[in-house]
Every structure is written in structure tokens, then in C-alpha cells.
Image: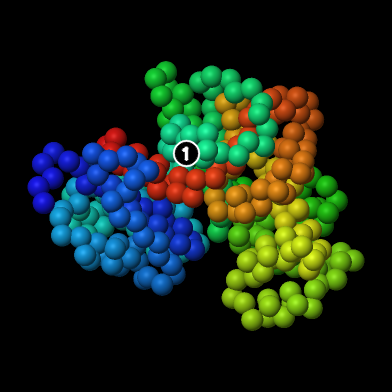
Amino acid sequence: MQWGATIMLLAGDIGGTKTILALFSSETKLREPLKKATFSSAHYPSLADLVQGFLSDIDFPIDRACFGVPGPVIEGRAKTTNLPWAIDEVQLQKALHIPSIRLLNDLTAMAHSIPLLQAEDLCTLNEGTAEPHTPLAIIAPGTGLGEGFLTWDGTCYIAHASEGGHADFAPTNQLEIGLLHYLLERFEHVSYEQVCSGIGIPHLYAYLKETSAMQESALVAEKMALARDINPIIFEAAFAKDAESALCLATLKTFVAILGAEAGNLALKVLATGGIYLGGGIPPRILSLLKDGTFMRAFQHKGRFSELLAHVPVHVILHPHVALIGAAYYGFTL
């Protein structure tokens, strides 16, 4: 096959739980990859091994690659958060025989996609009034908690990385103060990621189980005893029609309140009057809870700045592959 001047780009969304790879052509749309596959990240000793499996049946050269990775990228190197991988652009180029490889923070990749989102990609929690050319921000609870933002440079939005998910957890009520005390007895440092992510949900459940009057469902307890990951059980029980576990529902409501408070913190820190976007794998799974008012009350509960935050648009990103699209977009601009 003769590709001529066509650029063949490999893009990746590297996650603590799963990695999504896709092959793009400069002559096709970013939403229409030539090939895409999802892998369990923990099953591979390195990113190079994972990528080699994806490329094993591709018989034409790849010109570029761009990977969104969880964690800071410094001088082309990254030590991934929640994965035992050390990733280096130069080493990857040699191992994969790809001339140009770029790493970027996974939330920076997501942020690159925000200007490309369409109406059907979003669920709006607060219409607000977006001020043109002002900062945008994204907060994304998945396996971990990522945060990023965009600023206007006069002609377009520029994405910026952040590790705000690892900032100190700041409780806003008595229940959350108790949660902080509970976790400080078990961890040297308590970050937002430890209470507002896939990693954090089991901590919330354990705390409420130990300190509240709610009883754990015997069926839920039985399922959890057999599971490596209890989060799917918590989600299923929380939304069960027979109210299988009030404890599971309370866990997710606590999660939503903490997410709302930290989203409001992020909006204030970067003055994101253009809008806040909720990314990651968890928000689309809990839309009904995000819509019940708990999130926005916590988001706006900022004293003198509550009125300002009431006007900030807030959207949930529904498109499942925004980090992949953002990585591909960035890769084509290099």
C-alpha cells in the first residue's frame, strides 16, 4: 500500500487499569481510527511490550506516536502513577522503530480534546455563562484523579498539565473531617485521589461501614469477599432497584460531594469561567447522582465566590475516548 505524504500516527491513552491504542491517518477523521484495541495494563511488563502486540499485524511503517500517560512527563520521561512502568521517549523510539514519539500527561491529552467536543459528547450539569477565551478546566476521576486546564493564547487554547489530584484532601463537613482522621491513621498523606477516584471509593466504603449506623448487605459482603476489585459491586448495589445496599449508595453520594468540592477548588485556582469538564471513567456511570444537586451544591459552596461559581458551566464528558482523541490531535500538530 502506498501512503505517499500521509502521516500514520499511533495514539495511546495509558491508564492504570486499561490502555487504549489506536492507529490514525492524517487523511481520516480523529473520530475514525483505522484500528483500535483495549488492553489490560497490568498484564504487560512495559508499554513497549503492549504496543508491540498491537503492531504485530501492521505491515506499514508508523511515522509518529503520541501517548497520554498518568503522571508528570519530564524531559521525555514518565514514571506512571498506579502502574510500575518507567517510560522514555528515546527508548520507545528504538524499541518500536518509530521515528518520533511524544509523551504527554494524560490530563493534558484530555484537555487537548475539549475544544473538539460536540454537543452529543456532553451532559450539562450547570448551563452557566461561558466567558469567551477564559480558562477551561478538566477534572477526571478514573483509577486515579487527574486534573488539567487550558488557557487562551490569542488564537487557540493551550493545554497544561497538573498533578492537583495529589494535593491535600480538604474536608468540608463533619463527615469528611472524620474521613480525614480515619485515613490519617492509615496513610502518611491523604490526597484527593485517595478519596475521589477508583482507588478512593473503597476507602469511603470502609469508613462509612465502620463509622455509620448503616449495615452492610450480607449479599454485598459475600460478593466483595470474592472480588479483587470491589468498585463494580459498589456501583451495582448503589443503583439496584431493591436498594440492596444503602451503604453503597451513601459511598457514591459522599464521592459526588467530594468531587463537587474539588471541582469548585479547581475552578477557583485557574479561574475557569469558560467551563469545568468532568472526564474519566466514573462520571458517566453516576450521572443520576451528579444531577441530583449534591455535586453543584458542593461545587458552589465557596463563601464569597459562590455567586461566581454559580455562573461557571459544568459538563460531564460522555465520549469514552477523549484522551485518545486529544493525544492524536497533539501528535498531528508536532
Q: Residue at x 66, y 48 (%)?
A: 287
Q: Looking at the image, can residue 41 be seen?
A: yes
Among the 4 quarters of the image, the one containing residue 138: top right
The residue lying furthest to the front in this view is: 241
Q: Is residue 74 left or right of residue 218?
A: left
Please, which colouring scheme is shown? rainbow
Label 1 residue SS? helix
- Residue 113 location, x and y as percent? 44, 38
Among the 4 quarters of the image, the one containing residue 208: bottom right
Among the 4 quarters of the image, the one containing residue 186: bottom right
Q: Looking at the image, can residue 247 be seen?
A: no
Q: Residue at x 79, y 30 (%)?
A: 303
Q: Nearer the viewer, residue 175 or 191?
A: 175
Q: Indicate whether 102 appears above or below 56.
A: above
Kind of residue at badge 1: Ala
- Residue 41 location, x and y as percent? 42, 66
Q: Nearer the viewer, residue 260 or 39?
A: 39
Q: Residue at x 64, y 81 (%)?
A: 226
Q: Label 1: few (<14), some or many (≥20) within 10 Å?
A: many
Q: Indicate whether 38 appears above or below 217.
A: above
Q: Is residue 178 left or right of residue 111?
A: right
- Residue 274 location, x and y as percent? 57, 26
The residue lying furthest to the right in this view is: 213
Q: Is residue 207 left or right of residue 138?
A: right
Q: Indicate whether 245 appears above or below 24.
A: below
Q: Which residue is mark 1?
A: 111
Q: Residue at x 68, y 76 (%)?
A: 224
Q: How many marks?
A: 1
**Quadrant in which the C terminus is drawn:** top left
